[in-house]
Image (cartoon, rainbow, N blue to C red):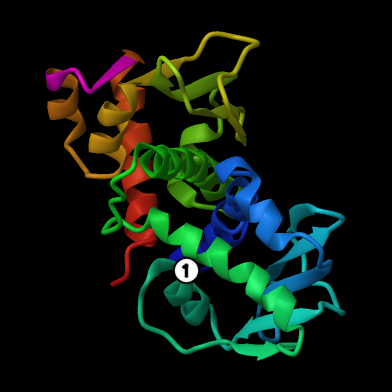
Amino acid sequence: MADTKSLTVRIILRSIIPLFKILYNENSGLYKKLLSGVNGTIQFSIKGTETGAYVEFKDGALDVIQQVRPDPDIHIAFKKPEDMIALFTGGKGGLPSVSGAWHVLLLLKLVPLFIGLTLLMPTKHPKSREKRLLKIKMTMYMVTNALSQLNKGGDEDMMAWTAKMPDRIFQLSVQPEGPAAYLRLKMGKSKSGHGCYERKAPFIHMMFNGLDGAYKVMAEGKDTVKAMGDGDVRVEGSPEYAGTLGSFMVRIQNMLTPG
């Protein structure tokens, strides 16, 4: 079974770094304009291991590939897992080594994306509606994907919970305009996705009352029970399963909170 440290690294690589793609397509193409014109790859990895992922800029598109490649243009290598965790969660740790930094333009392309990721920090509370909506969208996408990664990465409790579960959809949505994300569980397998799952009704549906309701719960940490009483969120489905899912969400939050 995987330990907390390796699971946290997995979530960073597979649930947080892919948010670069969301940031890249936001703001009416602003990031695309800033990042256009230069192709290249930027690798993130743990030294001496095959643990890593790389960002590829190619022909005006951005993609995140979950593997370590031998020839990245820029390689951001962390001495140990704790250092990667610290950089992406705002904790204390050693700085990575950077090879290929002479690709200055390519390295500069990464800066606005890293700045965009700071929206995930619990202390970051933007004033504009657009930024708040982006924070909620990123949080929702990250959390549903991270729940899947807990299962795929070998978290013992999550695997036990999903092992014999029939095909069920756990849906999160901001009503009425979105965003939305879901987690699908089926006999030990898991998959997350953006939007509302269309092929069957959700087993659990957590519906936030507009952006304000979602922000109070997902960004400001308002207690879910109180939020339900105040009308900020409505949960349809089994309270027992909703509570268990919520406990796994809290676990992910704790994993990504600096110690």
Placement of the C terminus among the 4 image quadrants = bottom left
Question: Is 256 part of what is drawn in magenta?
Answer: no
Q: Is residue 64 above or below residue 53?
A: above
Residue 18 visible, this orientation = no
Residue closer to the observer: 210 or 131: 131
Residue denoted by label 1? 88
User: What residue is drawn where x is 50% and y is 88%?
Assistant: 95
**Residue at the spot x=57%, y=62% of the render?**
113
Q: Which residues are magenta?
A: 230-235
* Residue drawn where x is 57% and y is 70% of the image: 111
User: Which image quadrant is residue 258 in?
Assistant: bottom left
Please name the residue shown 38% across and 60% down the image.
255
Q: Position of residue 182 (x, y in %)?
A: 53, 28
On the rendered structure, is 34 left or right of 4? right
- Total tally of numbered discs in the picture: 1
Q: Quadrant of residue 25?
A: top right
Q: Is residue 228 visible?
A: yes
Q: Label 1's element?
A: helix
Q: Amino acid at mark 1?
A: Phe
